[in-house]
Amino acid sequence: MSSFPNTSTDSAPSQPTPHTTASRPPTWRELQAWVTTFATSHPDRCRVSSAGTSRGGEDLPLLVIGDGPLKIMVIAGSHPNEPIGGQTIITLAEYVLAHPSERERATWYLIPSSDPDGLLLNETWLRGTWPPTMEAFHRGFYRPAGPDQPDWTFPFDGVGPAQLPETQALMKVIDAAEPDAVVNLHSSESGGSFYMVTRGEADLVGILAQAAARNGLPLEATPSDCIGLESPGDGVFVMTEPTPPPASGPDDPEEWRPAGASSAHYAARRKGCLGVIPEVPMWRTKPVTLSAEDGARLREAAAELCAGVLDRIEPATTVSTPYLPAVRDVVKILRFMARISRENPAQSADQDLNLLVPLRASGMLLQHIDAQLAATPDHPALLQARSLVEQQFSIWLRTAEQALQPAPIPLHQVVGYQLDTILGVARMLAR
């Protein structure tokens, strides 16, 4: 592995980033096996413990490397359909182990996956070629509903109890470690790279620019998640505090609301910890030309179709699946995003998520219907619903593929970007 060059904002790096030779990100079982092997092979330089247990009974390992004064926590798998971070954890651990200066500079707290249950539900496409085709990815797609996401259900006020055991585990690690930075590894299907941060450090603009340039990735001008957010420079956006639902009074159950704060918000309340979410695309895609109004209409049409199908098949639903609450949540998100588009038309034009979120919803809806058909194979309402959703899924898929023209991005580039970000943040804080 080559030496990592200076990542300060003063000069451009001259060497390639250390990168993985893996052909695809690891599955959850592969991550588990790697943690065991890594810790057993290097007992003098790292330690592993259990941070907690998932709702499905999976152990949540915490790997700690080094004993330096700076404390850096890195979390992968917050959204289980975003597995790139698992490979970044492996690459980061091997890099820190091979470079004593990094262990002397910082103590590294690594969470390989904060939602292993969800990661297991994405394995149908994760075990295939990397990156997956757009069709394979969305047919096997799973992302939990907001209230079921461990990293986005922290207490709004920073002091209340967490509802999910995985969230409780992350809170305990943050409370005990008191990290100087929490880097939460995320990825997207398309677009460019960008950061969401808890405070607008000017140096982060340079770290992002270098990480993206070194790894041949574009910057995202205005991600849909960041519409209306303050920005200290290109590609860096400062997250706002999520707003809790009203304690009393009218509350529309069909209106999407955040289920809680994130680990970045929670940690940022403790001794000025910096929260950084580096986003990176899975596919290289073409820019989309789509007005804010047309995008809003697409989202509303997808929401109405999925909601209507759920209503029609409710009497025939006999099997509980994790996809049902997830689809209901995406229906709310689609309507919410449509409203945001109309409120911010200048920033909401040309958003590729207008084409992709309907695929997420319909892909999970198909999996939910298939689970019902496995129990009652000849149910006419289920068969009719599946035919309708399959037809619309195919239409949305063709539209998205033709517009975006997705092309593979090698895994070492996206992992290199996240690795550059983590090390760049650590060196910025150490200065």
Image: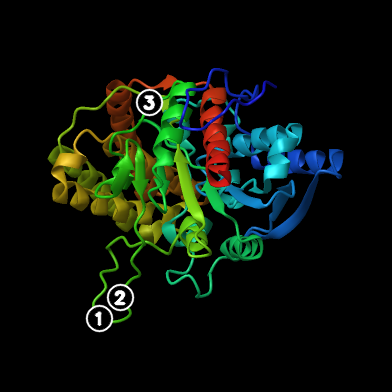
How far is disc 2 from disc 1 in space, using C-alphas?
7 Å
* Element on which disc 3 rests: loop
Provide residue 177's location: percent of width, then percent of height: 65, 60
Amino acid at the residue labelled 2:
Pro
How far is disc 3 from disc 2 in space, using C-alphas?
39 Å
Closer to the observer: label 1 or label 3? 3
* Element on which disc 2 rests: loop
The residue where tag 1 is placed is 249
The residue where tag 3 is placed is 218
Asked whether, in this view, residue 267 is left or right of residue 63, the answer is left
Residue at the spot x=75%, y=43% of the render? Answer: 35
Figure label count: 3
Amino acid at the residue labelled 3:
Pro
Residue at the spot x=45%, y=49% of the render? Answer: 368
Is 175 or 192 nearer to us in this picture?
Answer: 175
Q: How is the image coloured?
A: rainbow
The residue where tag 2 is placed is 246
Regarding residue 60, the answer to whether it shows in the image is yes
Closer to the observer: label 3 or label 2? 3
Contact flag, marks 2 and 1 (Cβ < 8 Å): yes
How far is disc 1 from disc 3 in space, using C-alphas?
45 Å
| Residue 19 tag number | none
Badge 1: how crowded within 10 Å, few (<14), some, or many (20+)?
few
Residue at the spot x=46%, y=34% of the render? Answer: 207
